[in-house]
Image: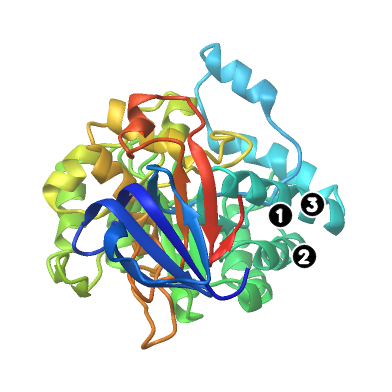
């Protein structure tokens, strides 16, 4: 559809912009891939096309800042064993590595594309995905290339697990050297699984330094299975996010909060800190304590919610499920949970700002000049996401101005 599109008669428009506006009987105009006007339905300008929202709520599209979509096979047996009482360990990643290496490029691309479409159908309009199921130079590069064709942000996670039979120090050298060089054309970020059974503090530090020296932004899998060095390393290296954060000491929370002291949340300016990304679907699947989102927000830490879609510990792309869980079990308000799943994810990916002036359009919030990523609900307000748990509430989705659902 070319020209401008007016969506009017919106029952509740939750912008998640810097003003935290929630507008009633609202309207919004889309022009190409951008938002060109927001305001009251009564004051809406003329447009080439008009859509009547019939009182439905409109939110920014979900920004899923943590997923692992490039894989083949499944780990149903592992899930069943865990539900029967077996504890989670990182070792199951190797099962997926074998399955992923065994399929061709076309099949792997088709699997990733289907997962992206599944996410979009539920309101996700901006997606990050990691490598990490190749774990050799050829397959990590292949995973990065395929991901770059299908998702919005690609993260290099060669440091996901030391492959069976490999020496941990030699493999870390590979991750920091030849493998990193192979993926560089396709990725913007690097990540490391700093956890027992995966990579030690020293190995994780080497990975982060090599990635930083190569010009990549940094992320860390940290503090998932117990207190550990993940948060401290993320803060030390100025990582954009540290993800999982199930087990945090008071010192961890203080350290994360300290990274945000130079940030003005009201204006979105200053020095960005390290986002704490909570992954509640994963926490439930692994039967870990839910990340302390309430405590982090109260301490002044910016948080994100993400689905962590992967075959072992969180085989879902439902951001609505994560929002619902955050409200019902993590003690976030509806507005806080939606913000963490939209603006928070954008903040974790460095995509929270941008407009007509700089041409790098912001995602995760609705404001003039931002990318036109909208999620219309089959409900009059966002509160229904938690009020009616488990009910599929996505009515329509616009991604970069194009109606995708």
**Quadrant assignment, res 275:** bottom left
Callout 3 secondary element? helix
Q: Residue at x 65, y 71 (%)?
A: 183
Q: Residue at x 13, y 45 (%)?
A: 298
Along the polypeptide, which appears first: circle 1 or circle 3?
A: 3
In percent of width and height, residue 247 lies at: 29, 37
**Quadrant assignment, res 255:** bottom left
- On screen, residue 37 above or below 136: below
Residue 155 seen in this snapshot:
no
How far, Cα to Cα, is label 3 from label 2? Answer: 19 Å
How far, Cα to Cα, is label 2 from label 1? Answer: 8 Å
Q: Which residue is mark 2?
A: 138
Along the polypeptide, which appears first: circle 3 or circle 2?
A: 3
- Quadrant of the snapshot with the N terminus: bottom right
Are discs 2 and 1 less than 8 Å apart at CB?
Answer: yes
Which label is found at residue 110? 3
Q: Which residue is outermost to the top?
A: 84
How far, Cα to Cα, is label 1 from label 3? Answer: 17 Å
The structure's colour scheme is rainbow
Q: Residue at x 44, y 48 (%)?
A: 53
**Quadrant assignment, res 367:** bottom left
Callout 1 secondary element? loop
């Amino acid at each position: 559809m070319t020209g401008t599109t007016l969506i009017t008669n919106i029952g509740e428009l939750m912008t998640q912009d810097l003003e935290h506006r929630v507008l009633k009987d609202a309207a919004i105009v889309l022009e190409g891939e951008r938002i060109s006007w927001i305001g009251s339905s009564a004051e809406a300008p003329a447009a080439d096309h008009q859509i009547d929202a019939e009182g439905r709520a409109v939110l920014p599209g979900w920004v899923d800042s943590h997923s692992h979509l490039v894989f083949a096979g499944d780990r149903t047996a592992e899930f069943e064993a865990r539900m029967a009482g077996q504890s989670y360990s990182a070792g199951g990643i190797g099962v997926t590595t074998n399955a992923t290496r065994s399929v061709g490029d076309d099949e792997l691309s088709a699997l990733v594309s289907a997962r992206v479409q599944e996410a979009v159908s539920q309101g996700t309009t901006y997606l990050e995905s990691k490598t990490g199921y190749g774990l050799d130079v050829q397959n990590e590069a292949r995973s990065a290339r395929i991901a770059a064709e299908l998702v919005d942000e690609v993260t290099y996670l060669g440091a996901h697990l030391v492959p069976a039979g490999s020496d941990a120090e030699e493999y870390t050298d590979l991750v920091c050297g030849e493998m990193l060089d192979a993926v560089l054309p396709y990725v913007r970020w690097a990540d490391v699984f700093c956890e027992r059974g995966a990579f030690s503090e020293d190995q994780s530090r080497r990975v982060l330094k090599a990635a930083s020296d190569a010009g990549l932004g940094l992320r860390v899998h940290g503090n998932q299975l117990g207190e550990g060095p993940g948060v401290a390393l993320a803060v030390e290296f100025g990582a954009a996010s540290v993800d999982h954060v199930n087990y945090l000491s008071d010192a961890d929370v203080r350290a994360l909060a300290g990274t945000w002291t130079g940030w003005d949340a009201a204006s979105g300016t200053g020095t960005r800190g390290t986002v704490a990304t909570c992954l509640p679907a994963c926490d439930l699947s692994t039967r870990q304590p839910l990340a302390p989102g309430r405590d982090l927000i109260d301490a002044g830490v910016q948080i994100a919610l993400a689905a962590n879609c992967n075959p072992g510990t969180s085989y879902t792309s439902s951001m609505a499920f994560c929002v619902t869980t955050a409200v019902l079990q993590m003690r976030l308000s509806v507005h806080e949970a939606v913000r963490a799943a939209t603006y928070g994810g954008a903040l974790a990916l460095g995509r929270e700002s941008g407009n007509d002036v700089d041409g790098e359009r912001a995602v995760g919030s609705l404001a003039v000049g931002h990318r036109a990523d909208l999620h219309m609900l089959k409900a009059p307000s966002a509160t229904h996401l938690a009020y009616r748990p488990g009910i599929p509430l996505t009515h329509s989705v616009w991604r970069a101005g194009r109606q995708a659902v």
